[in-house]
Amino acid sequence: MHRLRRLRAPTPHAASSFSYHLHTVPTHPPTLTSPCLSDPNFRSQVSSLITIQQWSKLEPLIQPANPTQFLQQLFEFNFPSDIILAFLQWSQHAFKVTHSLEDYIKLFILLANDKRYPKIRSLLHKLLKQANIVSNSAFFSTLLNFSDNSCANSIIVDMLIMTYANNGMYNNALEAFKRAGDYGFKLSVYSCNLMLGSLVKEGRVASLEFVYKMMIRRRIEFNLITFNIVINGLCKAGRLNRAGDVVEDMKVHGVMPNVVTYNTLIDGYCKRGGPGKMYKADTLLKEMVERRVCPNEITYNTLIDGFCKDDNLVAGVRVFKEMKQQGLRPGVITYNSLINGFCDDGKVDEALGLRDEMVDFGLEPNIVTYNAIMNGFSKKRMLKETRELFDDIVEKGVAVNVLTFNTLIDAYCKAGKMEEAMAIRDMMSERMVFPNVSTYNCLIGGYYLNGNKEMANKLLDEMGEKIIKADVVTYNIRIDAMCKNAETRKAVRLLDEMSEKGLTPSHVTYNALMAGYCREGNPNAALTVRRRMEKEGKSPNVVTYNVLIKGLCEKGKLEEANRFLNEMLEKGLIPNRITYDIIKEEMMEKGFVPSIDGHLYNDSKISKLEKY
DNA sequence: TTAGGGTTAG
Protein backbone atom coordinates (compact mmCIF):
# COMPACT_ATOMS: atom_id res chain seq x y z
CA MET A 1 0.00 0.00 0.00
CA HIS A 2 2.34 2.68 1.19
CA ARG A 3 5.47 2.29 -0.81
CA LEU A 4 8.58 4.31 -1.01
CA ARG A 5 7.76 7.13 -3.33
CA ARG A 6 10.83 7.12 -5.51
CA LEU A 7 11.71 3.51 -5.47
CA ARG A 8 10.51 1.82 -8.58
CA ALA A 9 10.83 -1.74 -9.68
CA PRO A 10 13.84 -2.16 -11.93
CA THR A 11 13.20 -1.93 -15.66
CA PRO A 12 13.32 -5.20 -17.65
CA HIS A 13 16.33 -3.81 -19.45
CA ALA A 14 18.20 -3.28 -16.23
CA ALA A 15 17.25 -6.73 -15.07
CA SER A 16 18.53 -8.48 -18.17
CA SER A 17 21.78 -6.59 -18.22
CA PHE A 18 22.70 -8.13 -14.89
CA SER A 19 21.55 -11.62 -15.69
CA TYR A 20 25.03 -13.09 -15.47
CA HIS A 21 24.71 -12.92 -11.75
CA LEU A 22 22.03 -15.51 -11.80
CA HIS A 23 24.88 -17.90 -11.47
CA THR A 24 26.93 -18.47 -8.42
CA VAL A 25 29.73 -16.22 -7.35
CA PRO A 26 31.65 -15.04 -10.37
CA THR A 27 35.36 -15.37 -9.84
CA HIS A 28 36.24 -12.81 -12.46
CA PRO A 29 33.24 -10.65 -13.02
CA PRO A 30 33.01 -8.72 -16.23
CA THR A 31 33.36 -4.96 -16.25
CA LEU A 32 29.96 -4.48 -14.74
CA THR A 33 30.05 -2.68 -11.45
CA SER A 34 27.00 -4.06 -9.78
CA PRO A 35 25.60 -7.49 -9.06
CA CYS A 36 22.04 -8.17 -9.97
CA LEU A 37 19.27 -9.36 -7.78
CA SER A 38 16.69 -9.76 -10.49
CA ASP A 39 17.09 -13.50 -10.42
CA PRO A 40 14.72 -15.00 -7.85
CA ASN A 41 17.18 -17.75 -6.96
CA PHE A 42 19.94 -15.30 -6.33
CA ARG A 43 17.59 -13.15 -4.30
CA SER A 44 16.57 -16.04 -2.10
CA GLN A 45 20.22 -17.02 -1.69
CA VAL A 46 21.06 -13.50 -0.54
CA SER A 47 18.00 -13.44 1.72
CA SER A 48 18.87 -16.63 3.47
CA LEU A 49 22.54 -15.69 3.88
CA ILE A 50 21.54 -12.40 5.50
CA THR A 51 18.88 -14.06 7.63
CA ILE A 52 21.29 -16.63 9.05
CA GLN A 53 24.04 -14.01 9.15
CA GLN A 54 26.47 -15.92 6.98
CA TRP A 55 28.39 -12.78 6.24
CA SER A 56 31.54 -14.48 5.04
CA LYS A 57 29.55 -16.18 2.27
CA LEU A 58 27.66 -13.02 1.44
CA GLU A 59 30.70 -10.84 1.12
CA PRO A 60 31.98 -12.33 -2.19
CA LEU A 61 28.47 -12.14 -3.63
CA ILE A 62 28.40 -8.40 -3.24
CA GLN A 63 31.51 -7.96 -5.36
CA PRO A 64 32.19 -6.03 -7.46
CA ALA A 65 29.54 -3.60 -6.33
CA ASN A 66 30.22 -1.65 -3.20
CA PRO A 67 27.98 -2.11 -0.17
CA THR A 68 26.18 1.15 -0.82
CA GLN A 69 25.20 0.05 -4.31
CA PHE A 70 24.19 -3.35 -3.00
CA LEU A 71 22.00 -1.69 -0.40
CA GLN A 72 20.30 0.31 -3.17
CA GLN A 73 19.51 -2.92 -4.94
CA LEU A 74 18.02 -4.42 -1.85
CA PHE A 75 15.69 -1.42 -1.73
CA GLU A 76 14.92 -1.62 -5.43
CA PHE A 77 14.02 -5.29 -5.28
CA ASN A 78 11.76 -4.70 -2.30
CA PHE A 79 13.61 -6.87 0.13
CA PRO A 80 11.91 -7.14 3.51
CA SER A 81 12.81 -4.49 6.04
CA ASP A 82 14.57 -6.82 8.47
CA ILE A 83 16.88 -8.12 5.71
CA ILE A 84 17.80 -4.59 4.69
CA LEU A 85 18.28 -3.61 8.33
CA ALA A 86 20.61 -6.56 8.96
CA PHE A 87 22.61 -5.79 5.83
CA LEU A 88 22.89 -2.10 6.63
CA GLN A 89 24.18 -2.77 10.10
CA TRP A 90 26.61 -5.46 9.05
CA SER A 91 27.96 -3.53 6.08
CA GLN A 92 28.58 -0.42 8.16
CA HIS A 93 30.62 -2.46 10.53
CA ALA A 94 32.38 -4.71 8.00
CA PHE A 95 33.24 -2.08 5.40
CA LYS A 96 33.46 0.94 7.68
CA VAL A 97 31.05 2.75 5.42
CA THR A 98 28.50 5.27 6.59
CA HIS A 99 25.24 4.96 4.77
CA SER A 100 23.48 8.13 3.78
CA LEU A 101 20.60 9.79 5.59
CA GLU A 102 18.44 8.89 2.58
CA ASP A 103 19.18 5.19 3.06
CA TYR A 104 18.36 5.37 6.72
CA ILE A 105 15.13 7.16 6.03
CA LYS A 106 14.09 4.67 3.34
CA LEU A 107 14.67 1.95 5.89
CA PHE A 108 12.74 3.81 8.60
CA ILE A 109 9.78 4.04 6.23
CA LEU A 110 9.88 0.32 5.49
CA LEU A 111 10.17 -0.48 9.19
CA ALA A 112 7.33 1.90 10.04
CA ASN A 113 5.09 0.26 7.46
CA ASP A 114 5.90 -3.08 9.09
CA LYS A 115 5.23 -1.55 12.53
CA ARG A 116 8.75 -2.48 13.67
CA TYR A 117 8.92 0.48 16.05
CA PRO A 118 11.57 -0.70 18.53
CA LYS A 119 13.87 -1.39 15.57
CA ILE A 120 13.39 2.18 14.35
CA ARG A 121 14.24 3.47 17.77
CA SER A 122 17.46 1.49 18.09
CA LEU A 123 18.49 2.42 14.55
CA LEU A 124 17.78 6.09 15.23
CA HIS A 125 19.87 5.82 18.34
CA LYS A 126 22.79 4.49 16.27
CA LEU A 127 22.29 7.10 13.55
CA LEU A 128 22.35 9.96 16.02
CA LYS A 129 25.36 8.50 17.77
CA GLN A 130 27.46 8.16 14.65
CA ALA A 131 26.45 11.47 13.11
CA ASN A 132 25.10 13.60 15.84
CA ILE A 133 24.70 16.56 13.53
CA VAL A 134 21.76 15.34 11.50
CA SER A 135 19.80 18.42 10.61
CA ASN A 136 16.13 18.17 11.38
CA SER A 137 15.13 19.96 8.20
CA ALA A 138 17.19 17.51 6.10
CA PHE A 139 15.58 14.64 7.97
CA PHE A 140 12.06 15.97 7.53
CA SER A 141 12.33 16.91 3.87
CA THR A 142 13.98 13.58 3.00
CA LEU A 143 11.19 11.80 4.79
CA LEU A 144 8.54 13.73 2.84
CA ASN A 145 10.43 13.02 -0.38
CA PHE A 146 10.28 9.29 0.05
CA SER A 147 6.95 8.72 1.73
CA ASP A 148 3.48 10.17 1.60
CA ASN A 149 2.16 8.05 4.43
CA SER A 150 1.57 10.86 6.88
CA CYS A 151 0.78 8.47 9.69
CA ALA A 152 4.04 6.52 9.36
CA ASN A 153 5.98 9.75 8.83
CA SER A 154 4.60 11.22 12.03
CA ILE A 155 5.54 8.09 13.93
CA ILE A 156 9.11 8.30 12.64
CA VAL A 157 9.40 11.97 13.64
CA ASP A 158 7.88 11.09 16.98
CA MET A 159 10.55 8.48 17.54
CA LEU A 160 13.26 10.90 16.42
CA ILE A 161 12.17 13.28 19.19
CA MET A 162 12.06 10.46 21.72
CA THR A 163 15.57 9.40 20.75
CA TYR A 164 16.84 12.95 21.12
CA ALA A 165 15.21 13.25 24.54
CA ASN A 166 16.57 9.87 25.69
CA ASN A 167 20.08 10.83 24.64
CA GLY A 168 20.11 14.18 26.36
CA MET A 169 19.97 16.05 23.04
CA TYR A 170 17.44 18.52 24.36
CA ASN A 171 18.11 21.33 21.90
CA ASN A 172 17.69 18.97 18.95
CA ALA A 173 14.49 17.64 20.49
CA LEU A 174 13.14 21.14 20.93
CA GLU A 175 14.06 22.20 17.42
CA ALA A 176 12.49 19.06 15.97
CA PHE A 177 9.37 19.73 18.03
CA LYS A 178 9.13 23.30 16.71
CA ARG A 179 9.73 22.30 13.08
CA ALA A 180 7.51 19.22 13.13
CA GLY A 181 4.47 21.51 13.10
CA ASP A 182 5.73 23.40 10.02
CA TYR A 183 6.15 20.12 8.13
CA GLY A 184 2.73 18.89 9.16
CA PHE A 185 3.88 15.96 11.30
CA LYS A 186 1.53 15.12 14.13
CA LEU A 187 3.32 14.33 17.35
CA SER A 188 2.03 11.93 19.96
CA VAL A 189 1.42 12.65 23.60
CA TYR A 190 4.13 10.07 24.41
CA SER A 191 6.98 11.88 22.73
CA CYS A 192 5.77 15.24 24.01
CA ASN A 193 5.58 13.91 27.56
CA LEU A 194 9.02 12.38 27.26
CA MET A 195 10.43 15.67 26.07
CA LEU A 196 8.62 17.64 28.77
CA GLY A 197 9.99 15.21 31.36
CA SER A 198 13.53 15.63 30.15
CA LEU A 199 13.16 19.42 30.22
CA VAL A 200 12.01 19.15 33.85
CA LYS A 201 15.07 17.04 34.70
CA GLU A 202 17.29 19.64 33.08
CA GLY A 203 15.52 22.43 34.96
CA ARG A 204 14.65 24.20 31.71
CA VAL A 205 11.38 25.82 32.72
CA ALA A 206 11.25 28.40 29.94
CA SER A 207 11.42 25.65 27.30
CA LEU A 208 8.97 23.58 29.30
CA GLU A 209 6.43 26.37 29.22
CA PHE A 210 7.09 26.98 25.55
CA VAL A 211 6.38 23.35 24.63
CA TYR A 212 3.31 23.31 26.84
CA LYS A 213 1.88 26.41 25.17
CA MET A 214 2.70 25.08 21.71
CA MET A 215 0.93 21.85 22.54
CA ILE A 216 -2.21 23.78 23.41
CA ARG A 217 -1.92 25.93 20.30
CA ARG A 218 -1.30 22.99 18.00
CA ARG A 219 -4.01 20.98 19.68
CA ILE A 220 -1.66 18.10 20.38
CA GLU A 221 -3.34 15.43 22.44
CA PHE A 222 -2.92 16.02 26.18
CA ASN A 223 -3.30 13.63 29.04
CA LEU A 224 -3.18 13.75 32.81
CA ILE A 225 0.50 12.85 32.78
CA THR A 226 1.30 15.84 30.54
CA PHE A 227 -0.28 18.18 33.08
CA ASN A 228 1.45 16.47 35.98
CA ILE A 229 4.86 16.77 34.33
CA VAL A 230 4.34 20.47 33.59
CA ILE A 231 3.09 21.11 37.13
CA ASN A 232 6.12 19.30 38.52
CA GLY A 233 8.51 21.37 36.40
CA LEU A 234 6.91 24.61 37.53
CA CYS A 235 6.89 23.51 41.19
CA LYS A 236 10.56 22.53 41.04
CA ALA A 237 11.34 25.99 39.68
CA GLY A 238 9.37 27.58 42.52
CA ARG A 239 6.71 28.87 40.12
CA LEU A 240 3.86 27.75 42.34
CA ASN A 241 1.31 30.28 41.14
CA ARG A 242 1.94 29.28 37.56
CA ALA A 243 1.57 25.62 38.59
CA GLY A 244 -1.81 26.58 40.03
CA ASP A 245 -2.78 28.09 36.65
CA VAL A 246 -1.96 24.78 34.97
CA VAL A 247 -4.22 23.01 37.45
CA GLU A 248 -6.98 25.36 36.25
CA ASP A 249 -6.05 24.61 32.61
CA MET A 250 -6.45 20.91 33.23
CA LYS A 251 -9.91 21.41 34.68
CA VAL A 252 -10.83 23.44 31.56
CA HIS A 253 -9.68 20.47 29.47
CA GLY A 254 -11.88 18.19 31.54
CA VAL A 255 -8.94 16.44 33.22
CA MET A 256 -9.24 16.10 36.98
CA PRO A 257 -6.17 16.34 39.25
CA ASN A 258 -5.19 12.96 40.69
CA VAL A 259 -3.07 11.91 43.64
CA VAL A 260 0.14 12.55 41.67
CA THR A 261 -1.00 16.11 40.88
CA TYR A 262 -1.68 16.80 44.56
CA ASN A 263 1.52 15.14 45.71
CA THR A 264 3.50 17.23 43.25
CA LEU A 265 1.87 20.44 44.44
CA ILE A 266 2.30 19.52 48.09
CA ASP A 267 5.99 18.81 47.49
CA GLY A 268 6.29 22.11 45.63
CA TYR A 269 4.88 24.02 48.58
CA CYS A 270 6.97 22.07 51.10
CA LYS A 271 10.20 22.81 49.29
CA ARG A 272 9.67 26.18 47.67
CA GLY A 273 6.54 27.67 49.12
CA GLY A 274 7.98 30.60 51.06
CA PRO A 275 6.33 31.90 54.24
CA GLY A 276 3.31 29.91 55.30
CA LYS A 277 4.25 27.12 52.94
CA MET A 278 3.40 24.28 55.31
CA TYR A 279 -0.01 25.77 55.98
CA LYS A 280 -0.64 25.72 52.22
CA ALA A 281 0.69 22.18 51.90
CA ASP A 282 -1.60 21.02 54.70
CA THR A 283 -4.53 22.83 53.07
CA LEU A 284 -3.86 20.92 49.86
CA LEU A 285 -4.10 17.65 51.79
CA LYS A 286 -7.50 18.72 53.12
CA GLU A 287 -8.60 19.81 49.66
CA MET A 288 -7.68 16.50 48.05
CA VAL A 289 -9.60 14.58 50.69
CA GLU A 290 -12.65 16.80 50.12
CA ARG A 291 -12.44 16.14 46.40
CA ARG A 292 -12.26 12.40 47.04
CA VAL A 293 -8.69 12.03 45.87
CA CYS A 294 -7.22 9.53 48.29
CA PRO A 295 -3.82 10.48 49.80
CA ASN A 296 -1.22 7.72 49.60
CA GLU A 297 2.07 6.93 51.32
CA ILE A 298 3.88 9.46 49.14
CA THR A 299 1.47 12.24 50.15
CA TYR A 300 2.20 11.65 53.84
CA ASN A 301 5.93 11.14 53.30
CA THR A 302 6.13 14.45 51.47
CA LEU A 303 4.31 16.30 54.21
CA ILE A 304 6.27 14.64 57.01
CA ASP A 305 9.53 15.54 55.31
CA GLY A 306 8.28 19.09 54.71
CA PHE A 307 7.38 19.64 58.36
CA CYS A 308 10.63 18.11 59.57
CA LYS A 309 12.67 20.35 57.27
CA ASP A 310 10.62 23.31 58.48
CA ASP A 311 11.91 22.54 61.99
CA ASN A 312 8.44 21.47 63.02
CA LEU A 313 8.92 17.97 64.38
CA VAL A 314 5.67 18.18 66.33
CA ALA A 315 3.68 18.58 63.11
CA GLY A 316 5.81 15.92 61.40
CA VAL A 317 4.94 13.42 64.10
CA ARG A 318 1.28 14.48 63.98
CA VAL A 319 1.13 13.68 60.25
CA PHE A 320 2.98 10.40 60.90
CA LYS A 321 0.23 9.39 63.36
CA GLU A 322 -2.47 10.55 60.99
CA MET A 323 -0.97 8.42 58.27
CA LYS A 324 -1.17 5.34 60.46
CA GLN A 325 -4.75 6.21 61.45
CA GLN A 326 -5.64 6.30 57.78
CA GLY A 327 -4.46 2.71 57.55
CA LEU A 328 -1.32 3.51 55.60
CA ARG A 329 1.87 1.76 56.62
CA PRO A 330 4.89 4.01 57.06
CA GLY A 331 7.76 2.79 54.91
CA VAL A 332 11.53 3.20 54.96
CA ILE A 333 11.23 6.65 53.37
CA THR A 334 8.72 7.75 56.02
CA TYR A 335 11.08 6.72 58.81
CA ASN A 336 14.08 8.24 57.06
CA SER A 337 12.35 11.62 56.84
CA LEU A 338 11.53 11.55 60.53
CA ILE A 339 14.94 10.22 61.56
CA ASN A 340 16.58 12.95 59.55
CA GLY A 341 14.30 15.55 61.14
CA PHE A 342 15.21 14.40 64.63
CA CYS A 343 18.92 14.22 63.81
CA ASP A 344 18.87 17.73 62.38
CA ASP A 345 17.28 18.92 65.58
CA GLY A 346 20.01 17.30 67.64
CA LYS A 347 17.71 14.57 68.94
CA VAL A 348 19.80 11.55 67.98
CA ASP A 349 18.40 9.36 70.77
CA GLU A 350 14.87 9.75 69.45
CA ALA A 351 16.19 9.10 65.96
CA LEU A 352 17.78 5.85 67.17
CA GLY A 353 14.46 4.94 68.79
CA LEU A 354 12.74 5.40 65.44
CA ARG A 355 15.37 3.23 63.81
CA ASP A 356 14.64 0.45 66.31
CA GLU A 357 10.92 0.90 65.72
CA MET A 358 11.28 0.48 61.98
CA VAL A 359 13.36 -2.65 62.46
CA ASP A 360 10.65 -4.02 64.79
CA PHE A 361 8.13 -3.44 62.02
CA GLY A 362 10.28 -5.46 59.66
CA LEU A 363 11.67 -2.49 57.77
CA GLU A 364 15.36 -2.64 56.91
CA PRO A 365 17.26 0.64 57.45
CA ASN A 366 19.11 1.58 54.27
CA ILE A 367 22.09 3.76 53.47
CA VAL A 368 19.89 6.88 53.65
CA THR A 369 18.94 5.95 57.24
CA TYR A 370 22.58 5.43 58.19
CA ASN A 371 23.77 8.62 56.53
CA ALA A 372 21.11 10.60 58.41
CA ILE A 373 22.12 9.07 61.75
CA MET A 374 25.82 9.56 61.08
CA ASN A 375 25.02 13.17 60.33
CA GLY A 376 23.06 13.40 63.58
CA PHE A 377 26.10 12.20 65.52
CA SER A 378 28.37 14.53 63.59
CA LYS A 379 26.16 17.55 64.32
CA LYS A 380 26.40 16.75 68.02
CA ARG A 381 30.17 16.52 67.65
CA MET A 382 30.03 12.80 68.47
CA LEU A 383 32.95 11.86 66.23
CA LYS A 384 33.52 8.50 67.92
CA GLU A 385 29.92 7.40 67.35
CA THR A 386 29.94 8.66 63.77
CA ARG A 387 33.03 6.58 63.04
CA GLU A 388 31.69 3.53 64.85
CA LEU A 389 28.47 3.59 62.86
CA PHE A 390 30.47 3.92 59.67
CA ASP A 391 32.67 0.92 60.55
CA ASP A 392 29.59 -0.98 61.59
CA ILE A 393 27.74 -0.58 58.31
CA VAL A 394 30.88 -1.31 56.29
CA GLU A 395 31.25 -4.53 58.25
CA LYS A 396 27.60 -5.35 57.64
CA GLY A 397 28.28 -5.07 53.95
CA VAL A 398 26.04 -2.05 53.38
CA ALA A 399 27.17 -0.28 50.22
CA VAL A 400 28.39 3.07 51.45
CA ASN A 401 28.18 5.96 49.00
CA VAL A 402 29.73 9.35 48.45
CA LEU A 403 27.32 10.95 50.94
CA THR A 404 28.43 8.52 53.65
CA PHE A 405 32.07 9.46 53.07
CA ASN A 406 31.29 13.16 52.90
CA THR A 407 29.42 12.96 56.21
CA LEU A 408 32.34 11.15 57.83
CA ILE A 409 34.89 13.54 56.36
CA ASP A 410 32.81 16.47 57.58
CA ALA A 411 32.75 14.99 61.10
CA TYR A 412 36.55 14.85 61.11
CA CYS A 413 36.77 18.40 59.69
CA LYS A 414 34.47 19.72 62.42
CA ALA A 415 36.70 18.01 64.99
CA GLY A 416 39.74 19.75 63.49
CA LYS A 417 41.24 16.42 62.45
CA MET A 418 42.16 17.41 58.94
CA GLU A 419 44.81 14.75 58.38
CA GLU A 420 42.30 12.01 59.14
CA ALA A 421 39.73 13.72 56.95
CA MET A 422 42.18 13.76 54.04
CA ALA A 423 43.14 10.14 54.69
CA ILE A 424 39.46 9.14 54.40
CA ARG A 425 39.19 11.06 51.16
CA ASP A 426 42.17 9.09 49.86
CA MET A 427 40.66 5.73 50.78
CA MET A 428 37.30 6.36 49.12
CA SER A 429 38.44 5.05 45.76
CA GLU A 430 39.23 1.64 47.32
CA ARG A 431 35.47 1.25 47.65
CA MET A 432 34.89 2.56 44.15
CA VAL A 433 33.41 5.77 45.52
CA PHE A 434 34.92 8.97 44.19
CA PRO A 435 35.18 12.44 45.73
CA ASN A 436 32.74 14.97 44.30
CA VAL A 437 32.29 18.70 44.70
CA SER A 438 30.70 18.20 48.14
CA THR A 439 33.70 16.18 49.35
CA TYR A 440 35.89 19.14 48.41
CA ASN A 441 33.46 21.56 49.98
CA CYS A 442 33.64 19.70 53.29
CA LEU A 443 37.44 19.66 53.21
CA ILE A 444 37.82 23.27 52.06
CA GLY A 445 35.35 24.40 54.74
CA GLY A 446 37.32 22.33 57.27
CA TYR A 447 40.64 23.94 56.35
CA TYR A 448 39.15 27.45 56.55
CA LEU A 449 37.60 26.58 59.91
CA ASN A 450 40.99 25.44 61.13
CA GLY A 451 42.73 28.54 59.81
CA ASN A 452 44.63 26.80 57.02
CA LYS A 453 43.96 29.04 54.05
CA GLU A 454 46.87 27.58 52.09
CA MET A 455 45.48 24.06 52.12
CA ALA A 456 42.00 25.36 51.27
CA ASN A 457 43.46 27.12 48.22
CA LYS A 458 45.45 24.04 47.30
CA LEU A 459 42.24 21.99 47.25
CA LEU A 460 40.51 24.65 45.15
CA ASP A 461 43.35 24.31 42.62
CA GLU A 462 43.07 20.53 42.77
CA MET A 463 39.36 20.78 41.94
CA GLY A 464 40.28 22.75 38.85
CA GLU A 465 42.82 20.11 37.80
CA LYS A 466 40.33 17.31 38.29
CA ILE A 467 37.65 19.29 36.46
CA ILE A 468 35.36 19.18 39.46
CA LYS A 469 33.30 22.33 39.07
CA ALA A 470 32.83 24.63 42.04
CA ASP A 471 29.16 24.97 42.97
CA VAL A 472 27.18 27.55 44.95
CA VAL A 473 28.23 25.91 48.22
CA THR A 474 31.94 26.16 47.28
CA TYR A 475 31.45 29.89 46.73
CA ASN A 476 29.44 30.27 49.92
CA ILE A 477 32.27 28.65 51.88
CA ARG A 478 34.86 30.93 50.27
CA ILE A 479 32.68 34.02 50.70
CA ASP A 480 31.99 33.19 54.33
CA ALA A 481 35.68 32.65 55.04
CA MET A 482 36.58 36.00 53.45
CA CYS A 483 33.81 37.82 55.33
CA LYS A 484 35.03 36.35 58.61
CA ASN A 485 38.49 37.60 57.68
CA ALA A 486 37.17 41.19 57.36
CA GLU A 487 37.39 41.02 53.56
CA THR A 488 33.70 41.51 52.80
CA ARG A 489 34.27 44.00 49.97
CA LYS A 490 36.55 41.49 48.27
CA ALA A 491 33.99 38.73 48.84
CA VAL A 492 31.25 40.79 47.14
CA ARG A 493 33.32 40.63 43.97
CA LEU A 494 32.90 36.86 43.93
CA LEU A 495 29.21 37.43 43.13
CA ASP A 496 30.24 38.49 39.64
CA GLU A 497 32.50 35.46 39.27
CA MET A 498 29.55 33.29 40.24
CA SER A 499 27.28 34.76 37.60
CA GLU A 500 30.03 34.36 34.99
CA LYS A 501 30.00 30.67 35.82
CA GLY A 502 26.24 30.50 35.62
CA LEU A 503 25.80 30.03 39.36
CA THR A 504 22.94 31.75 41.15
CA PRO A 505 23.85 33.09 44.60
CA SER A 506 21.60 31.68 47.29
CA HIS A 507 20.23 33.16 50.49
CA VAL A 508 23.29 31.79 52.25
CA THR A 509 25.56 33.77 49.92
CA TYR A 510 23.84 37.10 50.56
CA ASN A 511 23.37 36.42 54.26
CA ALA A 512 27.10 35.71 54.66
CA LEU A 513 27.94 39.02 52.98
CA MET A 514 25.43 40.93 55.12
CA ALA A 515 26.81 39.30 58.24
CA GLY A 516 30.31 40.27 57.11
CA TYR A 517 29.41 43.94 56.69
CA CYS A 518 27.58 43.92 60.03
CA ARG A 519 30.62 42.47 61.77
CA GLU A 520 32.70 45.18 60.17
CA GLY A 521 30.28 47.67 61.75
CA ASN A 522 28.72 48.70 58.45
CA PRO A 523 25.01 47.80 58.51
CA ASN A 524 24.33 50.29 55.69
CA ALA A 525 26.53 48.28 53.35
CA ALA A 526 24.63 45.18 54.51
CA LEU A 527 21.38 46.87 53.46
CA THR A 528 22.89 47.49 50.02
CA VAL A 529 23.50 43.74 49.76
CA ARG A 530 19.89 43.16 50.76
CA ARG A 531 18.68 45.40 47.93
CA ARG A 532 20.90 43.54 45.47
CA MET A 533 19.47 40.25 46.71
CA GLU A 534 15.89 41.50 46.31
CA LYS A 535 16.72 42.75 42.82
CA GLU A 536 17.77 39.18 42.03
CA GLY A 537 14.32 38.01 43.10
CA LYS A 538 15.25 36.64 46.52
CA SER A 539 13.22 37.90 49.43
CA PRO A 540 14.95 37.99 52.81
CA ASN A 541 14.53 34.91 55.02
CA VAL A 542 14.78 34.49 58.80
CA VAL A 543 18.58 34.35 58.73
CA THR A 544 18.69 37.59 56.70
CA TYR A 545 16.59 39.34 59.34
CA ASN A 546 18.58 37.85 62.18
CA VAL A 547 21.81 39.12 60.63
CA LEU A 548 20.41 42.60 59.97
CA ILE A 549 18.68 42.94 63.33
CA LYS A 550 21.81 41.87 65.16
CA GLY A 551 24.00 44.20 63.07
CA LEU A 552 21.75 47.19 63.76
CA CYS A 553 21.54 46.36 67.48
CA GLU A 554 25.30 46.23 67.72
CA LYS A 555 25.47 49.69 66.18
CA GLY A 556 22.94 50.91 68.77
CA LYS A 557 20.24 51.36 66.14
CA LEU A 558 17.61 49.57 68.20
CA GLU A 559 14.53 51.30 66.77
CA GLU A 560 15.62 50.43 63.27
CA ALA A 561 16.26 46.85 64.36
CA ASN A 562 12.76 46.73 65.84
CA ARG A 563 11.29 47.87 62.53
CA PHE A 564 13.02 44.95 60.82
CA LEU A 565 11.68 42.58 63.46
CA ASN A 566 8.13 43.72 62.67
CA GLU A 567 8.74 43.57 58.94
CA MET A 568 9.86 39.97 59.32
CA LEU A 569 6.73 39.04 61.26
CA GLU A 570 4.47 40.84 58.76
CA LYS A 571 5.97 38.70 56.03
CA GLY A 572 4.88 35.63 57.96
CA LEU A 573 8.43 34.55 58.71
CA ILE A 574 8.69 32.55 61.90
CA PRO A 575 11.42 33.72 64.29
CA ASN A 576 13.85 31.01 65.31
CA ARG A 577 15.93 30.42 68.42
CA ILE A 578 18.57 32.86 67.24
CA THR A 579 15.96 35.60 66.77
CA TYR A 580 14.86 35.15 70.38
CA ASP A 581 18.49 35.17 71.56
CA ILE A 582 18.99 38.47 69.75
CA ILE A 583 15.81 39.93 71.25
CA LYS A 584 16.98 38.88 74.70
CA GLU A 585 20.68 39.60 74.55
CA GLU A 586 20.89 42.53 72.15
CA MET A 587 17.67 44.34 73.03
CA MET A 588 16.12 43.47 76.38
CA GLU A 589 19.36 43.13 78.31
CA LYS A 590 20.24 46.61 77.06
CA GLY A 591 16.98 47.94 78.45
CA PHE A 592 15.10 48.12 75.15
CA VAL A 593 11.75 46.33 74.92
CA PRO A 594 10.79 45.72 71.32
CA SER A 595 7.23 46.39 70.27
CA ILE A 596 5.39 44.00 68.01
CA ASP A 597 2.26 45.24 66.22
CA GLY A 598 2.51 48.28 68.48
CA HIS A 599 2.31 46.09 71.62
CA LEU A 600 5.23 45.63 73.92
CA TYR A 601 6.96 42.29 73.47
CA ASN A 602 6.23 39.57 76.01
CA ASP A 603 6.54 35.80 76.24
CA SER A 604 2.96 35.12 75.11
CA LYS A 605 3.89 36.79 71.84
CA ILE A 606 6.56 34.15 71.40
CA SER A 607 4.26 31.20 71.74
CA LYS A 608 1.75 32.83 69.42
CA LEU A 609 4.38 33.39 66.79
CA GLU A 610 6.51 30.38 67.40
CA LYS A 611 4.99 27.70 65.25
CA TYR A 612 2.31 27.29 62.70
C1' DT B 1 5.91 8.32 30.12
C1' DT B 2 4.06 11.80 36.00
C1' DA B 3 4.86 12.43 42.63
C1' DG B 4 8.39 11.21 48.24
C1' DG B 5 13.97 10.29 51.96
C1' DG B 6 20.47 11.20 53.20
C1' DT B 7 26.29 15.36 52.88
C1' DT B 8 28.84 20.48 52.56
C1' DA B 9 27.45 26.96 53.25
C1' DG B 10 24.08 31.38 56.69
Image (cartoon, coloured by chain):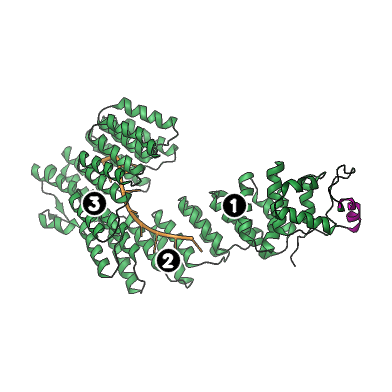
Chain colours: A green, B orange
Vertical side of A286 occupied by A52: above or below: above
- The segment highlighted magenta reads A11-21
Q: Residue at x 42, y 36 (%)?
A: A468
Q: Nearer the viewer, residue A500 or A435?
A: A435
Chain ID of residue with mark 2: A
Chain ID of residue with mark 1: A
Q: Point out the tag, 2 or 3, that comes first from the N-terminus.
A: 2
Write down the residue under mark 1.
Answer: A175
Marks 2 and 1, Cα distance to the nearest angstrom?
A: 27 Å
Amino acid type, callout 3: Met
Marks 3 and 1, Cα distance to the nearest angstrom?
A: 46 Å
Write down the residue under mark 2.
Answer: A247
**Residue A568, numbered label:** 3
Amino acid type, callout 1: Glu
**Residue A93 is inside the magenta segment:** no
Q: Secondary structure at mark 3?
A: helix
Q: Do badges 2 and 1 share one subunit? A: yes
Q: Residue A493 in the image: state x and y as whole percent.
A: 37, 33
